[in-house]
């Protein structure tokens, strides 16, 4: 039996399979990335050039950045950016504090009814989002918090899923570390900050990034509790551009606004993509 021929045949088959896989991945990548390319391309075309194209072109010979200036002058997009930044940073910071403390309590502390409480807590994930939105709206209205940052932030400062994800990560840390810390006189809060959070940093980073994306893309809740432009977010700004007629008359400027709003999240994902994958994969590990 000629083992060299068998090895060469196996190598050729492996190469063929890898080639097919890479070709399929490349095609899928083009399909996924094309809308982003089209968005950017449209944003750098002049309104006249865009309207004169009977058949849309996949390139432009005369790119322009004037649409970006028009997008910022059509509505106070800069102010909406500032509002969104305040909303995102405040909500994410408070959510991290609440989520980390709750996950630590469920993962490490012993108290009566803990398992039942955690089961009931997870059952909250079964409640339809629409019911939660209605309840939150009534509560915020009764508290007279409409058109305030507090009204925007409060309903988003906790997440059952994030607490569950962190709790599972915290539970993977060996009990021996906790007992050793207690022998050394380390308190629970110090142990959480000095040991548990650093060990589970990838998951904490993942939760942070996902929450930032969630806040930045928030649309329904801000539309419900704000009708004052002083508290509009960027998602409201896009809707305002469209509803004012400017977005329908000047599609390139509308696309420029979308590019500006999407760019921070794209950069954030590209910078922290490895941390996100590491944190998600760690959430499924045991031991």
Image: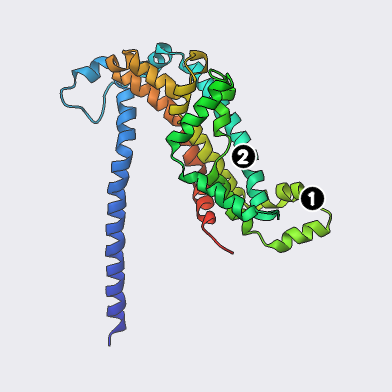
The residue drawn where x is 56% and y is 47% is 121
Which residue in the structure is indicated by mark 2? 96
Q: Position of residue 47 (x, y in %)?
A: 27, 16
Q: Residues within 10 Å of mark 1 (few under 14, many from 20)?
A: few
Secondary structure, mark 1, is: loop
Asked if 224 appears above or below 168 in the picture, the reply is above
- At 27% from the left and 58% from the top, the residue drawn is 20
Task: Work out which quarter of the rendered image holds the C terminus and state it.
Answer: bottom right
The spot of residue 137 in percent (x, y) is: 50, 26
Location of residue 122 in the rendering, given as x and y in whole percent from the top left corner: 53, 49
Q: Nearer the viewer, residue 223 or 84?
A: 223
Q: What distance separates the C-alpha of mark 2 from that of mark 1?
A: 20 Å
Looking at the picture, does residue 148 appear above or below residue 179?
A: above
Residue 218 locus on image (x, y percent):
46, 30
Q: Quadrant of residue 175?
A: bottom right
Of label 2 and label 1, which has the lower sequence position? 2
- Residue 59, can we see it? yes
**Quadrant in the rendering for residue 70:** top left
Q: Which residue is mark 1?
A: 187
Residue at 32% over, 29% down: 39
Q: Are marks 2 and 1 in contact (CB under 8 Å)?
A: no
Residue at disc 2, secondary structure:
helix
Would residue 90 appear left or right of 220 to someone viewing this image? Answer: right
Number of other residues with Cα within 10 Å of mark 2, as a class: few under 14, some 14 to 19, many 20 or more? many
């Amino acid at each position: 039996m000629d083992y060299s021929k068998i090895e060469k045949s196996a190598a050729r088959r492996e190469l063929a399979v890898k080639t097919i896989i890479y070709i399929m991945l490349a095609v899928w990548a083009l399909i996924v990335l094309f809308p982003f390319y089209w968005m950017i391309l449209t944003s750098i075309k002049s309104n006249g050039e865009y309207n004169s194209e009977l058949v849309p072109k996949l390139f432009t010979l005369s790119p322009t950045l004037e649409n970006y200036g028009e997008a910022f002058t059509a509505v106070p997009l800069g102010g909406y950016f500032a509002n969104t930044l305040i909303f995102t940073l405040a909500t994410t910071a408070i959510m991290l504090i609440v989520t980390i403390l709750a996950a630590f309590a469920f993962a490490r502390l012993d108290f009566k009814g803990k398992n039942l409480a955690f089961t009931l807590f997870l059952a909250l994930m079964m409640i339809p989002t629409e019911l939660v939105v209605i309840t939150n709206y009534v509560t915020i209205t009764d508290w007279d918090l409409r058109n305030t940052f507090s009204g925007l932030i409060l309903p988003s400062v906790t997440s059952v899923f994030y607490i569950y994800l962190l709790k599972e990560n915290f539970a993977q840390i060996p009990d021996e570390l906790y007992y050793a810390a207690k022998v050394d006189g380390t308190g629970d809060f110090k142990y959480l900050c000095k040991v548990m959070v650093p060990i589970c940093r990838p998951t904490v980073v993942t939760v942070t990034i996902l929450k930032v994306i969630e806040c930045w893309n928030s649309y329904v809740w801000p539309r419900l509790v704000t009708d004052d432009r002083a508290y509009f977010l960027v998602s409201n700004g896009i809707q305002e551009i469209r509803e004012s007629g400017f977005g329908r008359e000047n599609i390139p400027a509308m696309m420029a606004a979308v590019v500006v709003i999407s760019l921070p999240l794209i950069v954030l994902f590209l910078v922290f993509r490895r941390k996100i994958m590491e944190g998600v994969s760690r959430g499924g590990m045991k031991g």
